[in-house]
Image (spheres, coloured by chain):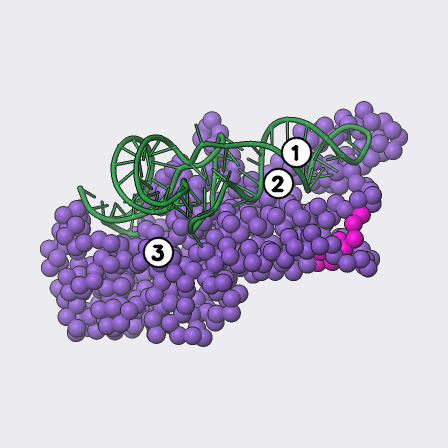
Chain colours: A purple, B green
Amino acid sequence: MALRLHDTLTQDKAVFEPRAPGRVGMYVCGPTVYDLSHVGHARCYVAFDVLYRTLRHRGFPVRYVRNITDIDDKIIQRAAALGEDPIALAARFAREYAADMERLGCLVPDVEPRVSDHLPEIVEMTRTLVEKGHAYVKGGDVYFSVRSFAPYGKLSKRKLDDLRSGARVEIDEEKQDPLDFALWKAAKPGEPSWDSPWGKGRPGWHIECSAMSLRYLPDGLDIHGGGMDLIFPHHENEIAQSEAARGVAFARFWLHNGFVNIAKEKMSKSAGNFFTIRQVLEHVEPEALRYYLLGTHYRAPIGFDVAIDEQGGLIGFPGLEDAERRVAYCYGTLQRMGERLAEPAEKAAMPAPFEAELEGFDAKLEGAMDDDLNTAAALGHVADLFRIANDLCDRQGKKQAPGVRKQLSRIRELLGPVSATLGLFTDDPASFIARRAGRILARRGLASAEIDRRVADRTAARSAKQFDRADEIRASLERDGIELMDGPRGTVWRVA
RNA sequence: GGCGCCGUAGCCAAGUGGUAAGGCAGAGGUCUGCAAAACCUCCACCACCGGUUCAAGUCCGGUCGGCGCCUCCA
């Protein structure tokens, strides 16, 4: 089996092989830190986290580089609006971003370079482009000459003449061609600036990714990723800068994730129809968001449901709440498995029918991930696994079957690669369930101690065979969204 | 206008030519004092029209509908 990835350059899937055996260089465009990250960012970084995890799980030594853009027009604008220092504002949102990533279960990249730490590399690459005739200086600005790079448009499948005719960009008198873009911008009063051969200034938007990616992946990139909206112009420009400067291919595989849509339209800052990651995490566990995102293939658009009351107030996120119930089901199953496995050992051998179904799982999971990281298909197989686990756990008393423990521990082993590659089900089951229950109860204004008391009342009524009274209490708890489960070890409750 | 993507059950969603994974909702059942949970069973003329093929949701052409990029954007 071999991992196949979809490459935007060829618009086709191909078997992934690193250019140099023994190491994989992977670069993902990180955020411009002028605000909190939203669900669209979450999707991108979760998707590439899965790629990172999968590569590592397959034994590739990976160097994962994900930048932080902390010098940018928007940061300067936002800082001016808030009366805050731009560098400080960027540092603040970079911390918030890191916290969001951690909560979503995204592994920390090997390198997270910041633009403000890499001015020398950026200046150097810009200087090289000027020397090679791919860039020109106008006043204190430096522009990349798009016409000087023949393959321009190869990633986004655009022709220069099409772009020109459709261009709605204002004609900048300083540019030789409207398509040219700034590598270096002359300083304006009150803005952060750095010294350069062209005077004080700061980097343009695209150059930082070329300079920083090649700084940490000097042999070139095996994989370059980001959102589909970066294909043009950002990634197209990165290719132009990098390949014009070095004369060699920049990245082998270009991977782009699809958008998160609200009411069929792309979630974006500029459209204002976005929800931040932490807004979402006020309503559901982080793992629910991760599970939800992985339920759709990373290149396909994913819808984001929002429930609004009549006054336009936010009620919640129905799709995410469904996902959370599903994650809770999985953790509930893991909890049952743990309890069952703690029981005394059996002697009987594993019966054949289950064995076959379980043994096929590894290959199914691997096959799904091999197919351009088909996490949705992978989760379909994971669903089978949890169903089998519950069925096994049900086999008690009269339905006792041999080999249950052995099979459950096998299932637990099979879940290892799931956690390793998808980053799911890594929490302690009891912790997840308790945390979720606590959050939902708090939202409903309920306390678990009070529920315990009501449950105890019902238990007393049941012992006295006062079933009407017992059912009355059950109904009352149900109205509060509490489900009761009478078992051999007594009654337990949980939030619906 | 240029380039590109998508249309699979009530909803979400996988499906790299050989008679449609999975989840939610719904119906029936097992279990239960009653329930719940869990499990079992049931539930698809793959937008439409042509074409290629022994065989098409899957390939090609067209129609209709939706979306994205071309300006900051994950």
Q: Secondary structure at mark 3?
A: strand
Kind of residue sitting beneath label 3: Asp
Do the CB atoms of the residues marked 1 and 2 lie less than 8 Å apart? Answer: yes
- The answer to whether residue A460 shows anywhere in this view is yes
Picture coordinates of residue A189, whole percent (x, y)? 22, 59
- Disc 1 is placed on an element classified as loop
Residue A442 in the image, given as x and y percentages of width and height: 62, 40
Q: Image quarter for residue B24?
A: top right
Name the N-terminal-most of marks 1 and 3.
Answer: 3
Q: Main secondary structure of the magenta part?
A: helix
Q: Position of residue A160 (x, y in %)?
A: 16, 55
- For marks 3 and 2, give the CA distance: 44 Å
User: In the image shown, does B25 or A408 lie closer to the viewer?
Assistant: A408
**Mark 3 or 2, nearer chain start:** 3
> Are the residues under marks 1 and 2 on the same chain?
yes
The residue to which callout 1 is attached is A481
- Frontmost residue, A389 versus A319: A389
Location of mark 3 (residue): A12
Please tell me in which quadrant of the rendered image residue A491 appears. Answer: top right
The residue beneath circle 2 is A440
- Residue A118 in view: no
Name above or below for residue A257 compared with residue A305: below
Is A435 in front, or is A78?
Answer: A435
Q: Which residues are magenta?
A: A400-409
